Image: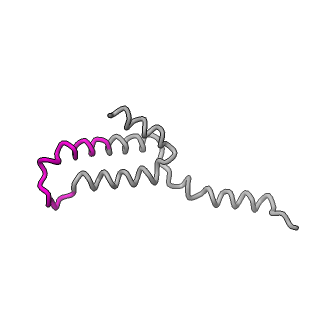
Amino acid sequence: MRYPSFASIIVTAIFLAGPFGAHGADWPQCEKAKLRQLDLQQERRQAAPLRPKKSRKKTPAASVEQLDEWLWKNCRGYSYELRDIEQRRM
């Protein structure tokens, strides 16, 4: 039985770890995006009764969803810190 070489193990580890580290954002970017998301959610809650149902301009809801997706893709490593920010805002 032939065992994999040390070099092939290192190359495999780098290959598997590559996609996860390449898209990550640093803490200040994640914190800023989360605070912006919370601000937009607050604006949406306050403006909901005033806004007509069929508005064609970009709504804060779309921006909140885009920020949520960006945070999910880029800031998973800071999930506990981001959750803490959200809890302090409530």
Q: Position of residue 86 (x, y in %)?
A: 37, 38
Residue in the picture at 37% in, 32% down = 88
Give the camera-side residue of 65 and 8: 65
Q: Position of residue 58 (x, y in %)?
A: 21, 57
Residue in the picture at 33% in, 34% down = 89
Q: Is residue 75 left or right of residue 55?
A: right
Q: Is residue 12 left or right of residue 42?
A: right
Colouring: one colour
Q: Position of residue 23 (x, y in %)?
A: 50, 54
Quick one: quadrant of the C terminus?
Answer: top left
Q: Is residue 19 magenta?
A: no
Q: Is residue 45 magenta?
A: yes
In the image, the segment drawn in magenta is 38-58
Number of marks in picture: 0
Q: Residue furthest right?
A: 1
Q: Position of residue 45 (x, y in %)?
A: 22, 44
Q: Residue furthest top?
A: 88
Q: Quadrant of residue 35?
A: top left
Residue in the picture at 46% in, 37% down = 81
Q: Is residue 30 left or right of residue 16?
A: left
Q: Residue furthest bottom?
A: 1
Residue 49 position (above or below residue 4): above
Residue in the picture at 46% in, 51% down = 74
Quick one: quadrant of the N terminus?
Answer: bottom right
